[in-house]
Amino acid sequence: MDIGIFIQILVWGLYAGCIYILLAIGLNLIFGVMKVVNFAHGELLMLGAYAVFWIHTYSRIDPYLVLPLAMLLMALLGVCIERLGFRPIMGTGKLNEIFLSLGLIYLFQNLVAFLWSTSSRSIHSPYGDVSVTAGSMKLPLDYLIIIIVTIVFLIGFQLFMKKTTPGRAMRATSQNREAAKLMGINVERMDMLSFALGSALAAAAGSLWLISGQLINPYMGAIPAIKAFAIIIIGGLGSIPGAIIAGLTLGIAENVAPLFMQSLANLFGFSMSFTAWKDTIAFFVLIIVLVLRPTGIFGEKGE
Amino acid sequence: MKYAILVAIVVVSLVLASGVGQSAETPSEAEEIKIGIVVPYTGLSSTTGIDMWKYAVMAAEEINATGGVNVSGVPMNITLLLGNDETSPAAGVKVVTKLITEDKVDLLVGGFNSGVTAADSVVAAEHKVPFIVTGASTPIITHRTDINTTYFFHHCPTGDDYAEFTLLCVNDIIKPAIYERFNFTEDRPLRLAFLYQDTAYGVGVYNGTKRAIEIHDLNMEIVAAEKFKMGETDYRTILTTIKAAKPDVVYPAALPTEQPLIVTQGRRDVGLDTIYLSVECNDDPVYYTGVGRSGEYSIQESRFGPYATPPGLTHDAAVKSKEDFKSRWGNYPSMMGASTYEGVYIAAEAIENAGTLDKEKVRDSLDELVMPPMIEEMKDGVITFSPDYRESKFVLYQEQLIWNETAGETRPKIIWPDSIKETDFVLPEWYEPGSAPTPTSTPTPVPTAEVPEKGVPGFEVVFAIASLLAIAYLVRRRRE
């Protein structure tokens, strides 16, 4: 196999990593500020994708231009979930929080299935037929746009968290909630903001997933959500840089690892295909990282 | 005393309730025929499952509208009970158990996913309930020897059938077109790449492919065989690996939620500009919408589709049935619904011939069934089940997808077999074969002695060794 094919597979891994990063950062943000694990995060990805699907289908507006509107809608939904769902039960026990988010999974899946059936849907990107040539490789323009959009979101997110007052307040809340209260920070407003931002990022991930040509259905959020959990554990709970590195690592690993395992098998004289093991790679990486560094790459003890 | 009276009332009530329940459930006194329709109404295969259910409902309504089923002079209406297997073996077993033990169905029709059907049919076998399987392709259903399969009747082609007819078409018209354009010699094997779902369905089609090549002695070579998990959404890495194997033709064994992604990602993202084959379950409106322009010139195996109807005994009935479906449900039906529609009619015919709802007699009636085809062309012009494995045989054909500007999607045209084709196969201009064309100027000299090539370590070997060393280093560091 030549190096060109390996590079092409790396690019696919990079694309997958971008989707995972957006999803994982949102999840990490919510956990970091509220110390709540939102198991329904994958359903926010799904709802974001459906938002873009329906707005694009009825308005015929470029789906990339619909993306900010979908993120805004999901941010509002995130506010509602936090205000009506999590805030009343905060402090009543972790089990309540877990069961609430599990309930939200079934609620959203079945609501979408009821409204729009379980049939898979897709859209065709207006740039679907456009490719960019790089040497011997031909890359669809959509993937480059997705990678660039992800980078823009990450830069914007970092600037928000570091340079703006609400961002600094959220970081303070995630570091020490009590101290943040004492400093005059409205922590409940920070919870709402973190949930809104987290939901918006999940919506961005779902929207980009749809635009890249994937099929969407009410149950599509399950596997990406599980991988997002693996990423935040690998990267370290509450660590945004950790989520970025882990997301990229996972996206690349699950595309490259089957190739590596096939090469290894060939070396020993076996002809086997490992491509069906792609999803297993995420948990294999998780196990290796936890064995070598139990708190995750950037995690801190006590989390 | 009061307690004694209370206990007595409770006991009497229980006895009465169980007695009432039993008499209402005695099949011989029922005025209806209960058929359980086992389909994936939710889950990954829900698009097909919903179609199967809708077509079954249409069949039952048609039968009931003409007086129902005559069971020894007693007209009985058909009542369908939906058994949603949720595209999962566990849910399939649960729902079939409920249909049989609680709902007391007389017969089962349906089953789409091979793995799910292989699991839930065990329950049907235990209870000796006739099961007309109308979607699952694995031949295991009637070939297995671990359970009593004499109550199972397979009214849909198997993976062996799909593969055989597809490869015969490839051999008859696709391979000659490729070889003529690129000047390949006849002794060059056609390079076939196989991409299959890691389930009973995918494995069945893969095994059928290997068997077809062997049985018909086809000059084809499987240069790559890659598996994927059911419901996979990202095929780029697999397709990149397949592209590296340089195939002439790619044969995915996938579902309507997977095939569009394989073809789109193959053509658009990976640049694998080849002829894509497809299993019949993808002859579905959802597939044509999903695959878009990328599916142009791909090949679709079929026996009943939403947009093409072969000439023959069933042509007019098939066209009418599709229009009736569209009027009723708002869209054209898919392939899998058609055999379920026929399955309900087959059940009705078998019960009428048996003259009873006794399951063993209905089973025997199905064994002896010979009825005219309905909306799908059948081999020898009849619906009947083979004596060995109780399989019915269909006339399968191949379509090529051609872009239709009016529809804004591709539409199928029948290209094989010759007896029913609408148009000729077109090898697209952008098509790239698996290997370089044979030079035409002078014949290649045959070397007199084989000189072994010096082995050059491939990139993947270096990669593998480097990774092993990295893992060994990490483990050693951990121990320190």
Image (cartoon, coloured by chain):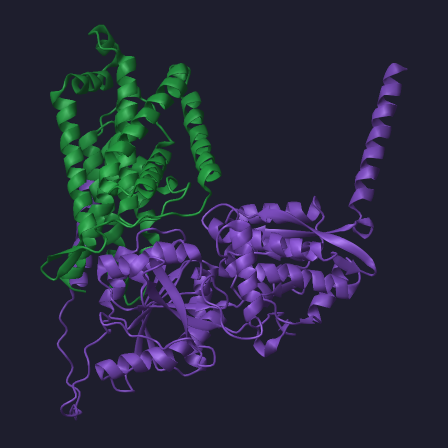
Chain colours: A green, B purple
- Residue A40 or residue B465, whichever sits in front: A40
Q: Is residue A234 visible?
A: no
Identify which residue is drawn at 52% across, 54% down.
B326
Q: Position of residue B41 (x, y in %)?
A: 53, 47
Give the residue drawn at x 44%, y 82%. Answer: B216
Quadrant of res B175: bottom left
Instruction: Answer above or below: position of A38 versus A261.
Output: above
Lateral position of residue A143 relative to residue B79, left or right: left
Which residue lies most toward the left here? A135
Q: Quadrant of the C terminus of chain B?
A: top left
Q: Position of residue A209 (x, y in %)?
A: 28, 44
Left or right: B384, with A104 as reference point = right
Q: Is residue A285 left or right of residue A81?
A: left
Q: Does residue A47 sit above or below B7 in this rendering? A: below
Question: In front: B9, or B155?
Answer: B155
Q: Is residue B220 above or below residue A26?
A: below
Coordinates of residue B278 in the picture (x, y in percent): 39, 65
**Residue A184 visible, this orientation:** yes
Quadrant of residue B169 in the image? bottom left
Report the residue that reaches farthest toward the right: B1
Measuring from the top left, give residue B44's x and y in whole percent. 45, 49
The N terminus of chain B: image quadrant: top right
Residue beneath the point at 49% across and 54% down? B48
Pick whichever, B462 or B107, lies toward us: B107
